[in-house]
Image (cartoon, helix red, strand yellow):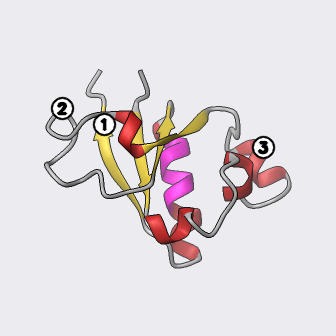
Amino acid sequence: MPAMQLALADEVYNGHATSHRSFLPPGNDANRAGVDDFSYVPADRAKPAGRAGYEPGELSFDLVIDVADENLAQWLQSHYDKIGVTLSTVSLDPG
C-alpha cells in the first residue's frame, strides 16, 4: 500500500510517454529522488470513486502516482511546481 498517491492532471499526462522516467528530470536528481520508489497507475484502476482517500469526482485525473515515501512525494510536487504543473495529493495513508 503506498503512503501517498499524487494525481497528475490529464493535459500533462496526454503530452508525455507513460514511462515514469519520462516524468522526471534527467540525471542524478531523478536517481536521488528514488525513481524506482513510485509507479504510475491509470486513475480509473487506482480506486473507485467513493472509496477512502477520494472525494466523489476526484478521479478526473488520467494518472495517479503511487509514492511510498512522503519525502519523495514532496520532491515530486516541488519539481512540478517549478515547471508550472500541479500534482495533487489524493490520498495519504495515516499508518
How crowded is the residue under tag 3: few (<14 C-alpha within 10 Å), some, or many (20+)? Answer: some
Region of the chain picked out in magenta, as a range:
71-77
Instruction: Please tell me in which quadrant of the rendered image residue 15 appears.
Output: bottom right
Percent across and percent down for residue 55 are 15, 48
User: Which residue occupies 25% across, 35% down?
Assistant: 48
Q: Main secondary structure of the magenta part?
A: helix
Q: Nearer the viewer, mark 3 or mark 2?
A: 2
Q: CA distance from mark 3 to mark 2?
A: 31 Å
Q: CA distance from mark 1 to mark 2?
A: 10 Å
Above-or-below relation of 94 to 72:
above
Q: CA distance from mark 3 to mark 1?
A: 24 Å
Q: Reading the chain from its start, which is encountered first: label 1 or label 2? A: 2
User: Which residue occupies 70% across, 57% down?
Assistant: 17
Quadrant of the rendering where the C terminus is positioned: top left
Which residue, given by chain and number where applicable, does mark 1 sit on?
92
Quadrant of the rendering where the N terminus is positioned: top left
Which residue, given by chain and number where applicable, does mark 2 sit on?
52
Q: Reading the chain from its start, which is encountered first: label 3 or label 2? A: 3
Which residue, given by chain and number where applicable, does mark 3 sit on?
31
